[in-house]
Structure formats: C-alpha cells, structure tokens
C-alpha cells in the first residue's frame, strides 16, 4: 500500500481525495464515451450551476493532490457530476460501497454480462445458486478470486 493509502479500522482502504476523484474520472464514465477532461467536467458543473463555480485547473489540482481542502460546494458539485453522494469524498466506508456499485454498473454495461443476468431472471432460487456456483468455479479457474459482487459475509 502506498503511504497515501491506509487500512481503516473496519478493514476498508482509506484513500485520499485525489485518489477518489481520479477513480471517478476513470470509472464513472459510460464505456462508450471517452474519459472526460478537466475542462469537460468544469464546463458541465458551471453550466448546471448557472455560474462559474469551479475551474478546470482547480479540478486538476484536486485530482493530482496539489489541493486537498475543497469547499463543500465543490465536493457537492463534483459528486453531482459523477452521480455519487458527496459522502463518497468524506467517508471511506461509503466510498467503498459506491465503488462496488460502480463496478457492478460497469459490468452490467458489457452486453454479454447483461445477457447472462437477463437470462437468469425467472430461474428458481436453486437454479440461480447452481449458476452462481458455476460462475464461482470459472472465476477460480481464471484466477479472478472472489466474486466482486459480494462482500465477505454476504451471499
């Protein structure tokens, strides 16, 4: 783990604001669209606010860790742009949950994953458990580890 990342008391990883913002830039963008530039994000936020609320330079500074203490207004605007709760930036446990949801949304955007999920709809609980077991075995064979859709202790 890098010096900027620590293990929290509940086992969650504690990340900096810059790491969280960078993660959103890389993952909260639809698959068929390019990663937005700092200018794109600033322009969208400013249009939504009806005023110059944030600059591209300031977003870059936050994303790179050069600035580390944004106002709540800035955090709320960034959260709104990326479609997450402002708590994402303030609470590591919330950030971890939101990251898991974003990973699931990204997976469902892949047509073959979505197709498997849709085809499983309507199957009995027993059949869905069997399907889940097959997926678990395939993940092990491919060295992918635990299913990212469940946290330890959940089924």
Image (tube, helix red, strand yellow):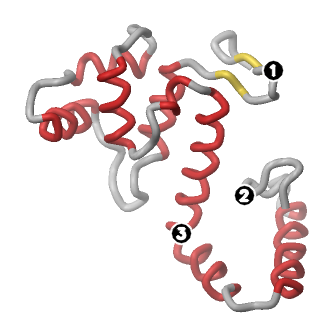
Is 57 on the left-hand or right-hand side of 13? left
Q: Secondary structure at mark 3?
A: loop
How far across and down, in percent of the image, does residue 59 sit?
A: 31, 22
Residue 133, which numbered label? none
Is 123 on the left-hand or right-hand side of 51? right
- Residue lying at 67% horizontally and 18% vertically, measured from the top left: 5
| Contact, mark 2 vs mark 3 (Cβ under 8 Å) | no
Q: Secondary structure at mark 2?
A: loop
User: Does label 2 or label 3 sit earlier along the sequence?
Assistant: 3
Question: Where 37 falls versus 152 (above or below)?
Answer: above
- Residue lying at 42% horizontally and 38% vertically, measured from the top left: 25
Q: Closest to the observer: 23 or 46?
A: 46
Per the image, the residue denoted by label 2 is 149
Count of numbered labels shown in the rendering: 3
Cα distance, mark 1 to mark 3?
Answer: 34 Å
Question: Where 18 falls versus 47 (above or below)?
Answer: above
Question: Where 146 falls versus 53 (above or below)?
Answer: below
Q: Closest to the observer: 92 or 40?
A: 92
Q: Residue furthest left?
A: 51
Is 96 on the left-hand or right-hand side of 25? right
Question: Split into 4 quadrants, where in the image is the C terminus?
Answer: bottom right
Cα distance, mark 1 to mark 2?
Answer: 22 Å
Numbered disc in front, either 1 or 2: 1
Q: Secondary structure at mark 1?
A: loop
Per the image, the residue denoted by label 1 is 9
Q: Closest to the observer: 1 or 104?
A: 104
Per the image, the residue denoted by label 3 is 110
How far across and down, in percent of the image, does residue 127 sit?
A: 85, 87
- Residue lying at 9% horizontally and 35% vertically, measured from the top left: 50
């Amino acid at each position: 783990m890098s010096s900027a990342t620590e293990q929290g008391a509940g086992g969650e990883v504690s990340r900096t604001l810059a790491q969280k913002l960078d993660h959103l830039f890389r993952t909260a963008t639809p698959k068929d669209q390019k990663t937005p530039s700092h200018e794109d994000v600033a322009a969208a936020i400013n249009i939504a606010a009806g005023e110059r609320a944030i600059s591209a330079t300031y977003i870059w500074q936050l994303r790179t860790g050069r600035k580390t203490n944004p106002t709540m207004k800035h955090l709320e605007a960034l959260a709104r742009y990326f479609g997450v709760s402002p708590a994402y930036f303030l609470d590591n446990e919330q950030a971890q949950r939101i990251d898991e949801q974003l990973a699931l949304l990204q997976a469902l955007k892949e047509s073959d994953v979505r197709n498997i999920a849709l085809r499983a709809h309507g199957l009995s609980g027993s059949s869905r458990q069997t399907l889940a077991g097959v997926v678990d075995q395939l993940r092990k064979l491919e060295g992918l580890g635990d299913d990212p859709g469940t946290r330890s202790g959940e089924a």
